[in-house]
Image: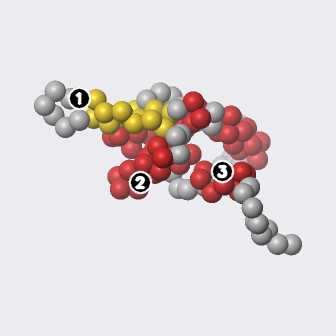
Amino acid sequence: MSMEHTGFCPVYRAIGVLQEKWVLHIVRALLNGEKGFNELARAVGGCNSATLTQRLEHLEQLSLIHKRTEDSHGKLARSVYSLTPAGLELQSVIDAIGAWAQSHLHEEGAHPEPSPC
């Protein structure tokens, strides 16, 4: 069975965007509110600065996040990131992934029980 795509498929495009490493981690971190770059890097965990910058720029181009610059009164300006309304709509995607994971993925050797995320 061939999975050839001969035209625009919104699901195919969405999966292409959301499967990029760190994208859903970034969205999930920003669902809790806006964050500065360093705070976001800590919340995402394990993503190097260059990759995080690249992902943030791409998400901004897609209008999923908004970047604003805060004047730090003589210090380096601080970038602050937040989700746009379109980005906030990904809450349902994150919730669906979480519900599926609770039902089907468990730590190896552990009894299935909810764990805080």
State the image quarter where residue 114 is shown. Answer: top right
State the residue at coordinates (76%, 47%): 104
State the image quarter where residue 73 is shown. Answer: top left
Q: Residue 53 shows which numbered tag?
A: none
The residue sitting at the left extreme is: 74
Mark 2–mark 1 distance (CA, rounded to whole Å)? 23 Å
Residue labelled with disc 1: 71
- Left of 52 or right of it: where is 111? right
Crowd around label 2: few <14 · some 14–19 · many ≥20 (10 Å): few
Does residue 105 sit above or below 16 in this rendering? above
Q: Earlier in the sequence, mark 2 or mark 1?
A: 2
Q: Earlier in the sequence, mark 2 or mark 3?
A: 3
Location of residue 112 in the rendering, given as x and y in whole percent from the top left corner: 74, 42
State the residue at coordinates (63%, 57%): 16
Residue labelled with disc 2: 54
Q: Tag 3: residue type?
A: Ala
Q: Residue 14 shows which numbered tag?
A: 3
Q: Is residue 95 visible?
A: no
Mark 2–mark 3 distance (CA, rounded to whole Å)? 18 Å
Task: Indicate the quadrant containing the C terminus: top left, top right, bottom left or bottom right.
Answer: top right
Task: Indicate the quadrant containing the N terminus: top left, top right, bottom left or bottom right.
Answer: bottom right
Mark 2 element type: helix
Q: Tag 1: residue type?
A: Asp
Mark 1 element type: loop
C-beta proximity under 8 Å, tags 2 and 1: no
Mark 3 element type: helix
Total tally of numbered discs in the picture: 3
